[in-house]
Image (cartoon, rainbow, N blue to C red):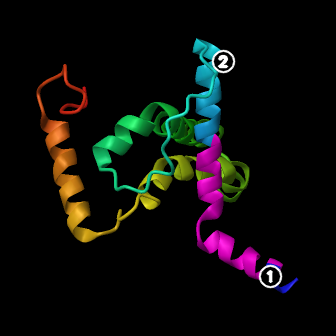
Amino acid sequence: LGKACEALVWLPLKMAPLYYAWSLGTKASYLDSALLFGGARYVATGRGFAIEHEGFTGLWRLYFPSHFEPALELSFLAIFYYVLARPSLAMYLRETWSIHLLSLSFLYTPFIFNPLGFDYTRLKADFKEWQDWMHCSDPFDSRRSWY
């Protein structure tokens, strides 16, 4: 009972529910892709877990279609519901807390669990790389431009 109570306290502090929702979104995205386009087979890569730092632009390119876009759509729809239905704030939060939690999970989990994501020098370099990526005018190279 003592270990269960300890886990009950530590799991939310470690942001495990956010990571769990995000990992389910990843699995759902791959399942959706396999059902729509085929190719549902295992391809062995010989690699283990990736424990390397990824920059803002790499995370954006990797997770935009599977996580960021659905999160932005869900957030927009929740706000749209609030504007149209005009419920009281307490009622709105009671009805949509799970949507906001899922959206926050999809938007911020890749950045929170990025190795060395909060190291100041890497954060500064990532931000500079992201600014260069946003201001690049070469539309044919996705590694250098966002559009």
- Please give left or right for residue 5 compared with residue 99 in the image: right
- Relative to 48, residue 115 above or below: below
Q: How many marks?
A: 2
* Residue located at (22% from left, 46% from top): 130
At a point 12% along the width and 33% down the height, the residue shown is: 136
Q: In the picture provided, is 8 more to the left or to the right than 60?
A: right
User: What quarter of the picture does the N terminus occupy?
Assistant: bottom right
Give the image quarter of residue 3.
bottom right
Q: Position of residue 26 (x, y in %)?
A: 58, 39
Q: Position of residue 29 (x, y in %)?
A: 59, 31
Instruction: Identify the amino acid type marked 2.
Output: Leu
User: Residue 18 versus residue 88: which sits nearer the camera?
Assistant: 18
Q: Residue furthest left?
A: 137
Residue 110 located within the stretch drawn in magenta: no
Residue at mark 1 = 3
At x 66%, y 59%, the residue is 17
Indicate yes or no whether the magenta region holds residue 22. Answer: yes
Vertical position of residue 1 compared to residue 78: above or below: below
Crowding around mark 1 (Cα neighbors within 10 Å: few <14, some 14 to 19, many 20+) is few
140 shown above or below 121: above
* Callout 2 secondary element: helix
Q: In the drawing, does residue 113 fall left or right of residue 122? A: right
The amino acid beneath tag 1 is Lys
Q: CA distance from mark 1 to mark 2?
A: 41 Å
Do the residues under discs 1 and 2 have CB atoms within 8 angstroms?
no
> Pointer 2: what residue?
35
Which region is colored magenta? Answer: 4-24
Q: In the image shown, does 42 or 127 lie closer to the viewer? A: 42
Residue 81 seen: no
* Mark found first going from the N terminus, 1 or 2: 1
Mark 2 is surrounded, within 10 Å at the Cα level, by few (under 14), some (14 to 19) or many (20 or more) other residues, namely few
